[in-house]
């Protein structure tokens, strides 16, 4: 019976993906898209499904449905309102999820109300929409991770489901590369850069990171042709983003996996060779001249020029920041419409040192849980993934953003859930 239900949810995920892809292809630029009958109908279908799964305690299915549609939020419009679909879903379900995971014995839980309280104490002079959105964005990922750990029951289903969702979205990626729609690609000095289902190449490479690493981990456990093909196709899709930080993070994450993982089947010589290959890649990267390519170290100036005007605002409110939503308030007038391109600076800008400390404490609490796990491929995967996204966050600010990184934190929760299920 359970296998039949699982098959049905996978078929439902395919239907959702087909519908979101149709809207994506026909909508054009999501910034000017105001909705359509199909978009409105899809929202009603999604919210109905989430209600059914939540109240019937089918929490694994609830998470999988959310995982398959959250990145399509800009084109899934709510009928009769200008509020985004993701904001409506958060407004309804995040309080319910917090209620379900309420646990005063869990030290990690306290960090969620602490982040929310800090947001409310220091409100920026911005529209309420930005404040509410900022509060949801800063608290959603810890809520989802703890919800998976505490309420879900089938980590294997969540892992397979997340990989499956990424696979069935791949046709959109390759359509973008071959057809070059304005809404699906960026073209710069690197050439054609696909945006996948995340509306930006650097966001899409973050979406692909955990599923590439999980597929690699499965290959390390057992070499299979089907898994190898999936890994290669994921890798090709990632390379088509032409993301510098994406490539660096991927190499570093797989390298960390090999350094951390203890496996009797693979001797130290292989690890040394892998470490040598990674080191050689870094050396080659450092030797590339700027006039030949903009992936040289000097190209960091692209980011430092963005960071320079941000730093004075951080210094003026170093302890608690400038308030939720304050960055977006200044973004157009002061920062040329660009995001902070550094997770740590972005958090410092709005939440200050206190906010950054709270968020890093939560990240550390998750990493510490993996340290406590017995040696396994999933322990190694979790540790490598967390350290990898911290590296990614040096030049990008997406790793603690619900729109870009939800699948990463859901999968981290699923990996921790494996430990919980084994203990039982």
Image (spheres, grey):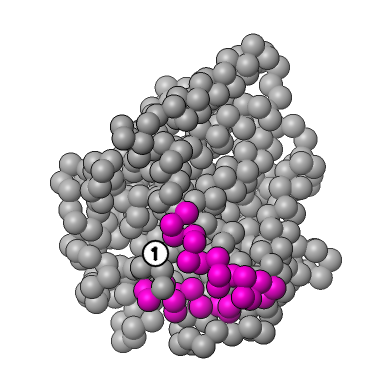
Furthest residue toward right: 105
* Disc 1 target residue: 338
- At which x and y percent is residue 248? 48, 37
Q: Residues within 10 Å of mark 1 (few under 14, many from 20)?
A: few
Furthest residue toward left: 179
Indicate whether residue 148 is drawn in magenta.
no
Task: Determine if residue 351 is in view.
Answer: no
Nearest to the observer: residue 44 or residue 134: 134
Write the residue at 62% across / 26% down. 258
- At which x and y percent is residue 87? 45, 76
Left or right relative to 313: residue 44: left
Q: Secondary structure at mark 1?
A: loop
The span shown in magenta is 304-333
Write the residue at 37% across / 31% down. 289
Main SS, magenta residues: helix
Nearest to the observer: residue 313 or residue 173: 313
Q: Quadrant of residue 59?
A: bottom right
Nearest to the observer: residue 395 or residue 226: 395
Q: Tell me how many marks there are.
A: 1
| Whether residue 174 is situated above or below residue 182 in the rendered picture | above
């Amino acid at each position: 019976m359970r296998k039949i239900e699982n098959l049905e949810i996978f078929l439902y995920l395919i239907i959702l993906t087909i519908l979101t892809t149709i809207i994506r292809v026909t909508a054009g630029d999501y910034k000017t898209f105001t909705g359509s009958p199909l978009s409105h109908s899809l929202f009603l279908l999604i919210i109905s499904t989430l209600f059914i799964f939540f109240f019937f305690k089918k929490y694994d299915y609830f998470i999988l449905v959310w995982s398959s549609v959250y990145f399509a939020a800009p084109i899934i419009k709510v009928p009769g309102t200008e509020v985004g679909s993701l904001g409506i879903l958060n407004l309804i379900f995040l309080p319910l999820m917090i209620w379900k995971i309420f646990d005063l014995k869990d030290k990690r839980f306290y960090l969620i109300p602490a982040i929310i309280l800090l947001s409310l104490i220091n409100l920026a002079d911005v529209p309420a929409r930005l404040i509410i959105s900022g509060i949801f964005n800063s608290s959603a990922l810890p809520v989802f991770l703890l919800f998976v750990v505490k309420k879900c029951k089938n980590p294997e289903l969540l892992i397979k489901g997340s990989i499956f969702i990424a696979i069935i979205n791949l046709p959109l990626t390759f359509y973008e590369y071959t057809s070059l729609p304005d809404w699906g690609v960026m073209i710069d000095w690197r050439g054609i850069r696909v945006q996948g289902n995340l509306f930006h190449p650097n966001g899409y490479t973050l979406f692909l990171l955990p599923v590439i690493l999980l597929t690699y981990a499965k290959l390390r456990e057992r070499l299979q042709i089907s898994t190898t093909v999936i890994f290669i196709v994921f890798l090709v899709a990632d390379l088509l983003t032409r993301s510098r930080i994406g490539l660096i993070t991927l190499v570093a994450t797989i390298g960390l996996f090999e350094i951390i993982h203890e496996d009797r089947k693979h001797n130290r010589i292989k690890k040394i060779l892998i470490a040598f290959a990674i080191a050689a890649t870094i050396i080659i990267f450092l030797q590339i001249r700027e006039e030949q390519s903009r992936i040289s170290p000097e190209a960091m100036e692209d980011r430092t020029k963005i960071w320079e005007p941000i730093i004075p605002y951080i210094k003026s409110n170093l302890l608690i920041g400038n308030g939720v939503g304050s960055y977006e308030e200044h973004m157009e007038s002061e920062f040329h419409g660009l995001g902070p391109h550094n997770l740590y600076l972005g958090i410092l800008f709005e939440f200050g040192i206190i906010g950054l400390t709270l968020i890093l404490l939560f990240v550390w609490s998750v990493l510490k849980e993996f340290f406590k796990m017995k040696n396994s491929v999933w322990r190694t995967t979790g540790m490598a993934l967390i350290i990898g996204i911290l590296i990614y966050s040096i030049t990008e600010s997406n790793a603690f953003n619900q729109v870009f990184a939800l699948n990463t934190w859901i999968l981290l929760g699923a990996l921790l859930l494996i430990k919980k299920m084994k203990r039982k």
